[in-house]
Amino acid sequence: MPGPKDLDPSSSPRALLGAELRHAREKAGLSQEELGGRLFVSGSYIGQLEAGTRRMQPEYARMLDEVLGVDFFLRNCRAAAKSEYPEHFAEAAEAEARTVAIREYAPMLIPGLLQTPGYAEAVFIAHQPTAPAGEIDGLVEARMERTKLLDNPTKPSLWVVLDEAALRRTTGGPEVMAEALGHVATMARQRRVIVQVLPFAGGAHTLMGGAVKLMAFDDAPRLVYFEGPGTGRLEDDPATVTRYELAYELLAASALAPRESLALIESVAEDYCHGDQP
């Protein structure tokens, strides 16, 4: 693995915490594994804190202050914890912004990075039917800000397996679906993303439990993110990540090839345009 990347402490509060943690750990003469052992976490978790791919939680900030003999981390971790995203997704969104490769399985929805404003609005209204319009607007704006990650022509690479259900469920109405699927097809035709569709005819598969996002980094261990309604969990255990990487590869092997997937997406989008979609 490449050596740790130097963070710019002025770029964000988490970068400041990561840079300070690395400095304090090295000053104390501790390896990442040794420091992790004192906090009852893995050395890779310490590496992710230093690299800025994981959010520092208050309980660990307090323990770091005690172990490293400083008065810094607990006082400053609250500023780093501020996020425009829901609490269950905030840490994953921050990691996503630093990833070099994403692989994602979407069982019911078009993934956030590929959503259009109209589609995102329909999703948020469905999830929070009593939320004020201003709150929905803020959520849509935050999601569209995330999509700018794909403005870079090469990083991160994005490989998505869409369940056919995500194409067939009319979210926001036919016009919204036609636009949303058209956008996915455009991104695929521009070769900015790899998109496969897992057809209903594929039957049972390895990721029937729900949505999964795998993330890889240049300077930090890989992560897997599991998400459900109003909840999410980021996991860095190497064995768990490896298991889900294999599950994803088996899933992709069961899905349609990218060219066939693109043809299906465009066909369903055309059906929505003409009102033919059941």
Image (cartoon, grey):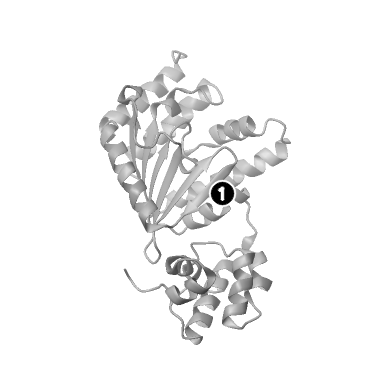
Vertical placement of residue 52 versus 105, above or below: below
Q: Secondary structure at mark 1?
A: helix
Q: Which residue lies at the image location 41% right of the left edge and 72% below the top edge? A: 5
Vertical placement of residue 16 versus 165, above or below: below
Vertical placement of residue 92 versus 267, above or below: below
Q: Which residue lies at the image location 57% right of the left edge and 72% below the top edge? A: 17
- In the rendering, at what x and y percent does residue 109 appear? 48, 33
Q: Is residue 153 visible?
A: no
Q: Quadrant of the N terminus?
A: bottom left
Most foreground residue, 178 or 258 = 258
Most foreground residue, 49 or 243 = 243
254 displayed left or right of 85: left
Q: Are there few (<14), some (14-19), or many (20+) residues within 10 Å of tag 1?
A: some
209 displayed left or right of 94: left
Most foreground residue, 274 or 234 = 234
Please give the count of numbered marks on the rendered protein: 1
Residue bearing mark 1: 89
The type of residue carrying mark 1 is Phe
Q: Quadrant of the C terminus?
A: top left
